[in-house]
Amino acid sequence: GAVVSQHPSWVICKSGTSVKIECRSLDFQATTMFWYRQFPKQSLMLMATSNEGSKATYEQGVEKDKFLINHASLTLSTLTVTSAHPEDSSFYICSARETRGYGYTFGSGTRLTVV
Amino acid sequence: DQQVKQNSPSLSVQEGRISILNCDYTNSMFDYFLWYKKYPAEGPTFLISISSIKDKNEDGRFTVFLNKSAKHLSLHIVPSQPGDSAVYFCAANRRTFGNEKLTFGTGTRLTIIP
């Protein structure tokens, strides 16, 4: 079946630094990828939708200058958390929408801890 | 505004019995519903889905029921197995409107008691 690889699985960074998270669709092309954030014991909250070759669409309240999304190819999308602060510590998950069919495949998530 | 709600944060079921997880939604424009299973520190895994033109979809031990008039869907797992212990999320979107965004519920933690 469809597989989405997300790296790193966890990262610890210092406050003020930037962190890049990669999301790759391994055996299918994904014209659309989604980035979610999950706080402990809460639901997955959609941050942004990225379409290959175009600018990402951010949800209300999500700072586009802080959470930079790049979807340069049909198999790769990246989320860069810029100037990270402790409140950005969270679990980030990407999802890829298969070009054919209606499936959504999720990555394994990235635990970001900002100290 | 929580458009998809799972009012039971947790549920415990004896192994071999039926697990019933419930989900309610408020947006009548949703036309496609999905259930995901999630372990801690992992991404969600797709279980089963249903289109709004149906009221039931079955796949092995998993059955999803949709009651559009009540804006309610449920996931039945029978028989329940220890490996089913996880957090279950329902999700919805407006596929026919070209909206691919999934809106997730708050999740229900299912514990299967051996």
Image (spheres, coloured by chain):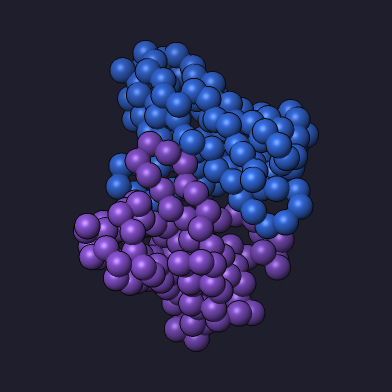
Chain colours: A blue, B purple
Q: Position of residue B57 (x, y in %)?
A: 56, 74
Residue extending farthest bottom:
B69
Residue A32, visible in the rendered structure: yes
Q: Is residue A60 above or below residue B2?
A: above
Is residue B60 found left or right of A103 in the rendered image? left
| Number of disc labels | 0
- Identified at 58% across, 31% down, the residue is A5
Q: Residue at 70%, 68% (x, y): give it.
A: B96
Query: Residue B19 lies in what quarter of the image?
Result: bottom left
Res B56 → quadrant: bottom right
In percent of width and height, residue A114 lies at: 35, 21
Percent position of residue A26, x then y: 67, 33
- The image shows residue A70 at horizontal and vertical percentages of 66, 29
Q: Is residue A4 left or right of residue B91?
A: right
* Image point (71%, 37%), residue name: A27
Residue B82 is left or right of residue B32, and the answer is: left
- Residue A88 seen in this snapshot: no
Q: Measured along the vertical axis of the image, is residue B41 above or below residue B99?
A: above
Task: Examine the rendered structure and indicate whether residue B16 appears above or below residue A3.
Answer: below
Please report the residue visible at 53 percent of the width from the left and 62 percent of the height from the top.
B48
Q: Quadrant of the N terminus of chain A?
A: top right
In which quadrant of the rendered image does the C terminus of chain A lie?
Answer: top left
